[in-house]
Image (tube, rainbow, N blue to C red):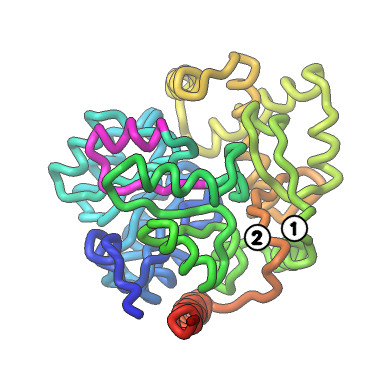
Amino acid sequence: MNLHTPICDRFGIEVPIVQTGMGWVAGARLVSATANAGALGILASATMTFEQLTRAIGEVKARTDRPFGVNLRADAEDADARVELLIREQVMVASFALAPSERQIKTLKDAGVCVVPSIGARRHAEKVAAWGVDAVIVQGGEGGGHTGPVATTLLLPQVVDAVDIPVIAAGGFFDGRGLVAALAYGAAGVAMGTRFLLTQESTVPDAVKRYYLERTVADTVVTSKIDGVPHRVLRTDFVDELDHASSVTAIPRAIRNAFAFKKLSATSWRGMLREGRALKAESNLKWSQVVLAANTPMLLRAGLVEGRLDAGVLSSGQVAGVIDDLPTVAELIARIMSEAQETLKRLSELQ
């Protein structure tokens, strides 16, 4: 009945649950609540300036004395400075959406910071495992945001069999039954985004949360029209409009959003070009797709911060269709662990 797994020891947490670093959502309030409940909360730094990240880390540390993580962009203009910040502040975990470099991994690990990239394919897991990362988050196609075509139930066992480091399952998890299923596949825990977005500590506007709760499992769509790569979001009239837009309207919109995000993030044009080149190389994109990628931060901000369904997008896993409440983070984690124990007890009684 013991649900203490290798990531509990490695990250210094009590339960094998990770709250993912969702841009514009995973701020200090949500992360500290997750940490205080015994799980691993991860700050989303890609949508923060360096100064905002510094303040957010300080706010989390003021709210909790438990371990937490920070999600980084390996290709960011100030990535090295952010790595040094995590080391200086003794942050427990550095997570990455795109694979960090071997140099970044070594720098972090030499300082005692655990490195945990997210991956969507077996070959990517094998690559970063060979570089020495501490664990990987494996997201199947059910997950929200950037996602791949392979379902979690197929991708997860592939990766578990391919690497000898802890594997954290993501994509389609929201309750204790899912946690037990992931452990049965060989995972060391689960990571959840949409389920944590729909909690009381999430800063997403209440009207947007209600919109999520009203959706069914058929109300998400995977589109490449937002930023050039497959992205799972809630279906809205605006998303349908984007999906049918031509490059004549899409590219100018992306350029306008690039200007807006540049101003908001204080990123230089040189830095944005550098990030674009890295994204192009990492994801094998065309330059037109790289330009579209400038859409993402501002479209997400419009939806998740400003609450605009008419001009923003809402990243979402398919689990939005089976979630019907807004618990506190503490209530959510306690419920998941109770459900997991009940599931294990039921399985142990089978003859």
Q: Position of residue 52 (x, y in %)?
A: 41, 49
Instruction: Report the span colored magenta.
Output: 123-139
Residue 132 on the magenta span:
yes
Q: Amino acid at mark 2?
A: Val
Q: Residues within 10 Å of mark 1 (few under 14, many from 20)?
A: some
Residue lying at the far front of the rendered structure? 351
Q: Tag 2 or tag 1, which sits nearer the N-term?
A: 1
Name the residue nearer the viewer: 216 or 340: 340
Q: Is residue 190 in the magenta section?
A: no
| Above or below 204: residue 22 | above
Which amino acid, by three-letter code, is at mark 1? Val
Depth check, front residue: 225 or 90 = 225
The answer to whether 204 appears left or right of 111 in the picture is right
- The Cα atoms of the two marked residues, 1 and 2, are separated by 7 Å
Residue that appears at 30% across and 72% down? 4
Residue at screen point 54% across, 51% down: 153
Residue drawn 46% across and 18% down? 281
Q: Is residue 175 left or right of residue 57?
A: right
Number of marks in the rendered image: 2
User: Residue sitting at 72 percent across and 30 percent down?
Assistant: 225
Give the labeled residue for mark 1: 217
Q: Is residue 42 left or right of residue 325?
A: left
Q: Is residue 229 visible?
A: yes
Residue 3 picture quarter? bottom left
The picture places residue 58, in percent across and down from the top left corner, at 32, 60
Q: Which residue is mark 2?
A: 319
In the structure shown, which secondary structural element does the residue marked by tag 1 occupy?
loop
For the residue carrying disc 2, how many other residues have a C-alpha within 10 Å: few (<14), some (14-19), or many (20+)?
many
Position above or below: 243 against 177: above
Q: Secondary structure at mark 2?
A: helix
Image quarter in which the N terminus is found: bottom left
Callout 1–callout 2 Cβ contact below 8 Å: yes
